[in-house]
Each structure stands twice: as structure tokens, then as C-alpha cells.
Image (cartoon, rainbow, N blue to C red):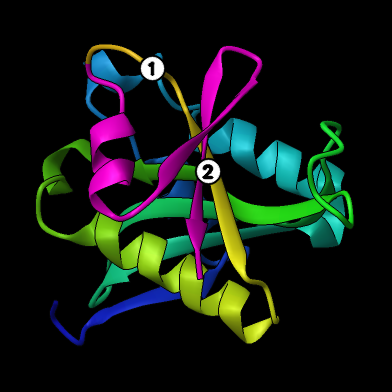
Amino acid sequence: MPSTLRLEKITPENVDAALALNVHPHQEKNVAPVATSLAEAYAYGDTAWPRLILDGDEPVGFLMAFLDIRWGTGNDPEGRRSGLWRLNIAAGHQGRGYGRFAVDAVRDELRGRGKNRMYVSWEPGENGPGDFYRRLGFFETGETSGRQTVGVLDL
């Protein structure tokens, strides 16, 4: 992975670049647009961690992690989970390792915060990202979040 990849906090200077990112049209049913994610980040405050993914100065994607969000299943001893909430890689930039970079960046952030598990959920079915997450080591928990499959990665 080139060393030019980095994450940047969403700021007034780069918010328009983040909002301009679009996934392939056939993937739109699988992930909310960046505008929705940023609205949720505003509503969730410090429990949301939105970042722009840059290759050099070029925006190539967006991610948003969730930090210590109360999970209603009761399966976790502390009742809180952290993980990857959203991942949008721009249509013209897919297949180049940006998604893996994003997952690794969230993993490293969570490890640095003392977490030992990273959660993600995805829309099942054709053109869904399930195979991508399984290749990165996530396994299905058997839970669902709405219609989405819940996966976890031990850190």
C-alpha cells in the first residue's frame, strides 16, 4: 500500500470532497451515502468517528467508525461495542486496496483505544461486501442489525 494513504478528520475544508464521493450504482443499496453518515455523526457526537480517505491529495473514500455504542443484544459483558459503521470507496477507486486500508486504520484506532473486538455489519446478497469482510478475517456472529449481517474481528 502506498505511503501516501491517510485519513483526515472531516472539516469545513474537505466536507464537500467527502460529500462528492459515490460508490458504484449497484452498491448504493448496500451503504448509506456520505451525507447520511455525516448527519448521523453529528447526531451521535463523540461516539462517531468519520474520516476522509485520501491518496495523496485525492479523496478516494470515506469511513465512519463507532466508538462504545450501547448494543441492545446483551451479549457483550459491558453492553458496548466499537467498529466500522460505514465504508464508501468511490466507484473509480475500488479494487486498489483502499477498503483494506480503511479497515486496518479503524482496527489500529480501536486497538489504540484498548478495544479487543471490532464489529461491522453489511447488507447480505449480491454485490454486498460480505466476502470482502470475511477475507479480512471477520466472522459472522449469528446476529443481525435490522436486515444486516453482523460480523466481528478479534483484535
Horizontal side, residue 60 vs residue 52: left or right: left
Horizontal side, residue 77 vs residue 100: left or right: right
- Depth check, front residue: 20 or 127: 127
Q: Dividing the picture into quarters, in which one does residue 90 lie?
A: top left
- Please state, as top left, top right, bottom left or bottom right, where the N terminus lies in the image: bottom left
Horizontal side, residue 61 vs residue 62: left or right: left
Q: Is residue 92 visible?
A: yes
Q: In the rendered image, which residue does mark 2 sit on?
A: 120
Residue 152 position, x and y percent, is: 52, 48
Residue 147 drawn in magenta: yes
- What amino acid is labelled 2 in the image? Val
Q: Residue at x 54, y 67 (%)?
A: 13
Kindly report the distance in space between the C-alpha atoms of the residues bearing marks 1 and 2: 12 Å
Q: Secondary structure at mark 1?
A: loop
Residue 7 position, x and y percent, is: 43, 73
Magenta residues? Answer: 127-155
- What amino acid is labelled 1 in the image? Pro
Q: Residue at x 38, y 69 (%)?
A: 104
Residue 145 position, x and y percent, is: 65, 23
Classify 42 as above or below 78.
above
Residue 39 drawn in magenta: no
Disc 2 crowd, CA 10 A, few/some/many (<14, 14-19, 20+): many
Q: Dividing the picture into quarters, in which one does residue 52 lie?
A: bottom left
Q: Which mark is residue 124?
A: 1
